[in-house]
Image: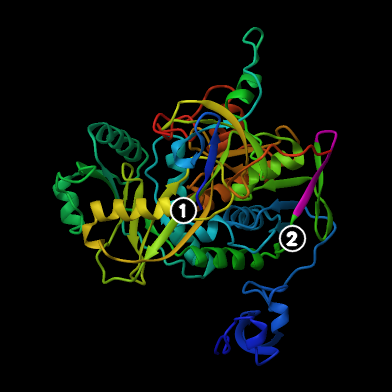
Amino acid sequence: MAALSLPLTICKPFRIFDTFSFTSIVQTEGRYTERTCTRAFSDIGEHMYLDCTPLWGKKPRLKSSYDVVIIGGGLHALATAYYLAKEHGITDVAILEKRFIGFGGAGRNTAIVRANQRTQYNVPLYKEALDLWPVLTKELDYNLMFNNCGNLNLVHSEAAIKAARIAISTAQFHGVESHFLDAKQAKEMVPALNISEDITYPIHGAMYHPPGGVVRHDAVVWGMAKGCARYNVDIHQQTEATAIHSKNSKITGVTTNHGTINTSRLLVTAGGYSAGILYNMLGIKLPISVLTIQAMVTQPLKPLLNHVVSSGAYHCYANQTLKGEIATGAHMDPWPNYTTQNTAHYIKHQAEALSDWLPCLRGVKFMRIWGGLADMTPDMAPILDGNDPLEGLYMDCGWGYFGFKSFSAAGKYMAEYMATKECPKMLEPFNLRRYENHQLMGETPALVNYSPDN
Amino acid sequence: MALTLTCPICGKRNGYEFRYGGEDKGPRPEEEGLSKRNWCEYVHMNTCKIGVVKEWWFHRDGCGSWFTTHRDTAKNIEVDTPEATT
């Protein structure tokens, strides 16, 4: 039952044993069995993931052809594969993941879900994703720990009140619960909130969105992987796509570090790496800038936040995890950056922001920090398109920092798109050509690299 | 990890003094006969290259210069002009 019993430090002079053993519980065909692995310390560097059976099933062999190939092993890939199999009977699907599933945005987001976006095109998509959490929990038979604790979006100016009112009207029109609270009501809901006037951005009120909340993001990855495995989808980890092939403007295959696969339908949904992949392998340019977004958690505290609270002006959001940590984030350096590294600048910014609007956190220590990639589009809305410019090529990218909360609905509709080869109504507004036709969505008033405050 | 950039007038300065101005896409296209696609290409489209990219920067909190420089987006570090590759 125990995990590693020896420290994992691989300093040669201090090493006493050459091998170590550990026991893990593995699930095969619905039964749980214990399995003991013995590994050499010298293997750890090369085989970080060890040679054990993945949680979701057997390690598949890479076949020479698949009906559908998906580049990327994140939640959008898993969901698309899952719905291709479940709703459309297409089970000959390969997921190609360069590292391991959940390595990217799926495991780096701050687990917040909501459906109170700004435009009439986005809200129905996010609403569907929000409504799918309890459905997926049941379907996958996996506890996703969906906690619809509600989101409060603080507003700090008259302009922000107006913007919130527009967003609330849009939400209500689409049947999404959303209300405006004044500062006193917000304080009643979140007593830790500082609504005094002597802070940098005094709080005028909040947009309250009760059905939003948080989900355990790792559980979602594991649950979706199990769902895919149930339909015999092949999840290939440590498998990197290195080239995409086409002939007569039709997709014909993909080359990977483990060999070439023939396929006529290919989906590129590799989060922040999608745009680079499409340009490197096919010369397709996208209206995307890939930024590093940072997040952190504090030391665990007694319960003080029962909601997700966010502030546009402070550029900061916070919610309390079940462990008691305050999970907080949002900062992005406004220039392309693939490092996923943190900055001292941001840690200082976050400490200043939090101690302003949640003053009870003054003096609390940050425990962990991390970063991930956000592929930002000029209108803060994703690009979901297919068969343009190559037949059989589909893309699902440009989600910025909205990829986690949207993945199930996006996957469901992308699966329909790839199965029927016709764009579902829901996805039509998200086509790539909207940029040249000047039909940008206005999901945000502040664009990534041409905003006034940048 | 801190970024520093070299302004042609002020020299090496903290990256937060600058505003990013996008990938270098060459000269602004002539307006006569310009197609929507070509304009969109110039305004919005990026290569999103992971590696050395030639970019525009603006010394916002400094002398106000607009200049181009090379930066490695995989490391978030300014680099010298890259060597020619085949």
Q: Tell me the chain of label 1.
A: A
Q: Nearer the viewer, residue B22 or A226?
A: B22
For residue A397, what is the image quadrant?
top right
Q: In this view, does A90 lie to the left or right of B22?
A: right
Residue A185 horizontal side relative to residue A211, left or right: left
Residue A313 lies in what quarter of the image? top left
Q: Residue at x 67, y 64 (%)?
A: A231
Q: What residue type is labelled 1?
A: Thr
Q: Where is residue A121 in the image (x, y as percent from the top left)?
A: 46, 35
Residue A343: mark in rendering = 1
Q: Does the magenta stretch include residue A248?
A: yes
Task: Give neighbour class at mark 1: few <14, some 14-19, many 20+ (Cα, 10 Å).
Answer: some
- Mark 2 = which residue? A239
Distance from Cα at disc 1 to Cα at disc 2: 31 Å
> What's drawn in magenta, residue-wise?
A241-249
| Secondary element at image label 2 | loop
Identify which residue, A415 or B83, lies in the foreground: B83
